[in-house]
Image (spheres, rainbow, N blue to C red):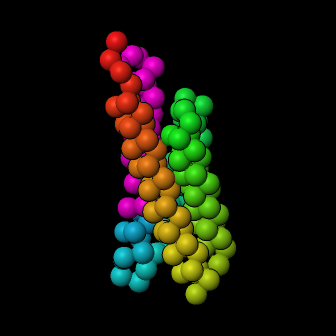
């Protein structure tokens, strides 16, 4: 594997780690006694923004199917950000609904990044050795 391939793989692994961390943080916040708080959402907003920006930055280094899965993940991360932001502006049931939607989109973004990793591995395994 060349230097560029290694950087692309590391980049994709970093995006996957960030999306999994975001999903875990939202899951933990929801599972807390009393549910997620506005303070939780403020921290989650920063995590979602960072994960989305990193994923967007990684798009240019990816190819075909990997790029599509990563683009889908970016869309889900942006939706997560929106739901977190909506949650910060709401209360009661609307707050809980926003948190649940953020959790679902964070889970979907992590799944899309995992699919991108799988597509990357599949593409690498079909290359013939030189």
On screen, residue 62 versus residue 125, left or right, reads right
Where, quadrant-wise, is the N terminus in this rendering? Answer: top left
Q: Quadrant of the C terminus?
A: top left
Residue visible at 65% across and 78% down in the picture? 90
77 part of magenta stretch: no
Q: Nearer the viewer, residue 21 or 70?
A: 70
User: Where does residue 117 sit, x and y in percent of width and height?
Assistant: 41, 42
Pick out the residue farthest to the bottom.
Answer: 93
Residue 59 relative to residue 10: left or right: right
Considering only vertical position in the picture, is 57 above or below 109? above
72 and 100: which is toward the camera = 72
Residue 80 visible in the snapshot? yes
Q: Residue 129 location, x and y as percent?
A: 32, 17
Q: Is any atom of residue 55 visible in this view?
A: no
* 20 in the magenta segment: yes
Q: Nearer the viewer, residue 58 or 21?
A: 58
Q: Quadrant of residue 29?
A: bottom left
Does 76 sit above or below residue 56? below
Q: Residue furthest top?
A: 130
* Residue 99 rendering spot, x and y as whole percentages: 53, 73
- Residues drawn in magenta: 1-24
Most foreground residue, 118 or 83: 118
Q: Position of residue 25 (x, y in %)?
A: 40, 62
Residue drawn at (45%, 29%), measured in percent from left and top? Answer: 8
Residue at the image position 50 percent from the left and 56 percent from the top: 109
Residue 67 figure quarter: top right
Residue drawn at x 54%, y 81% is: 96
The quarter of the displayed image where residue 11 is located: top left
Q: What is the chief secondary structure element of the magenta stretch?
A: helix
Q: Quick check: 85 above or below 57?
A: below
* Total count of labels: 0
């Amino acid at each position: 594997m060349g230097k560029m391939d290694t950087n692309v793989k590391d980049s994709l692994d970093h995006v996957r780690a960030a999306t999994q961390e975001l999903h875990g943080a939202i899951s933990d916040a929801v599972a807390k006694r009393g549910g997620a708080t506005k303070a939780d959402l403020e921290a989650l907003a920063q995590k979602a923004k960072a994960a989305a920006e990193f994923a967007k930055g990684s798009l240019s280094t990816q190819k075909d199917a990997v790029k599509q899965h990563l683009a889908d993940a970016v869309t889900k991360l942006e939706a997560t950000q929106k739901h977190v932001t909506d949650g910060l502006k709401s209360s009661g049931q609307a707050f809980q609904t926003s948190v649940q939607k953020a959790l679902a989109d964070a889970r979907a973004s992590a799944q899309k990044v995992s699919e991108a990793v799988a597509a990357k591995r599949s593409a690498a395994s079909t290359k013939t050795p030189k």
